[in-house]
Amino acid sequence: MNQTVLKATDLSRDYEVGGGLFSKPGIVRAVADVSFEVQAGKTLAVVGESGCGKSTLARLVTMIEAPTGGSFTLAGTEVTPEKWSDLRTDIQIVFQDPYGSLNLRQRVGQILEEPLKINRPEIGAKERREKAREMMRLVGLREEYIDRYPHMFSGGQRQRIAVGRALMLEPKLLVLDEPVSALDLSIQSQILNLLLDLQERLDLAYLFISHDLSVVRHVADDVAVMYLGRMVEKGSKDDVFTAPRHPYTRALLSATPKADPRAERGRIRLSGELPSPLNVPPGCPFAPRCWKAEDKCRRDRPRLDGGPQPVACHFPEAPQPGAAGRAEPATA
């Protein structure tokens, strides 16, 4: 049985917005009561529309920001701000834009050695250099490039450097925040295959954040769907893609491009507007856009439950294989 590397329980993050001399600030619940687990050697993909809270969740897990509610553990150790300095080396992040995340004034060798200089001061300069060369070989770069600057590499090569830097401290978990969305399609497959190869070699856990469901289908073991800061469905990749239970998940999957021009599309076009995060309606937050919504949905907020494929919906689809693609069309 795989070891649980990361376990989050009711994680929440609130932000104060606006306010002034005579008015109170509004509260945006960017992440609300999110719970999940990530096992060693496995990938949990978090998907949803822009603004659903995916990147905020990444900042909480990587200890960039402290949660305002809930908790999470790393390899059984509860993560608190007092322990951040000791635990940060076990979780590293790879950002979407490798050009923006690398220091353009440093050579590749310096970029790779810097995590060791800061967190492993007992390692000497010669050993750091050798570890940097080993890492370049591991991520598929020629070690003679070690004295080049980031601008001398292609986008895919820069992302390999970013992945190598994240692995220098031998973390247990990588948070991958849209790691291939800034790359050409031909390069995306190379980086994804690299990530899968590294996961198998190093028994890494991945928290993979993406809006591209075709990429998620290629790399994920489990999928969590977020909407307005909350998880609305979780399950194995096969269950979620084959038989989505939440209407929002079905709408997302119906919008995924299909390579086969003869395949039935069954696109679900959602009506209504996305509610303001400053004024989330009572009940189910998806109700204003849902073709299945009834009075109960607008009144009572559903809980995320329902066995191995839990769903936050009062009227979910039965977990039956083959349900995907048979959705009722909604009003455009």
Image (tube, helix red, strand yellow):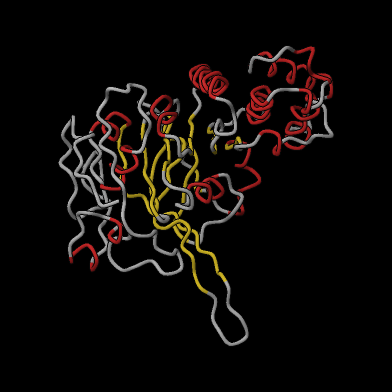
- Residue 273, horizontal then vertical, whole percent: 38, 60
Residue at left offset 77%, top offset 32%:
114
How many labels were placed on the picture?
A: 0
In the image, taking residue 158 as reference, residue 207 lies left or right, namely left
Q: Is residue 175 visible?
A: no
* Viewer-nearest residue: 119 or 330: 330
Q: Quadrant of the N terminus?
A: top left
- Residue 159, horizontal then vertical, whole percent: 64, 27
Res. 191 image quadrant:
top right
Q: Is residue 130 above or below residue 241?
A: above
Residue at left offset 78%, top offset 33%:
117
* Viewer-nearest residue: 254 or 98: 254
Q: Is residue 156 visible?
A: yes
* Viewer-nearest residue: 308 or 192: 192
- Residue 328, horizontal then vertical, whole percent: 19, 44
Q: Residue furthest bottom?
A: 22
- Residue 255, horizontal then vertical, whole percent: 35, 38
In the image, taking residue 154 as reference, residue 182 lies left or right, namely left
Q: Is residue 144 above or below residue 93?
A: above
Q: Is residue 153 above or below residue 9?
A: above
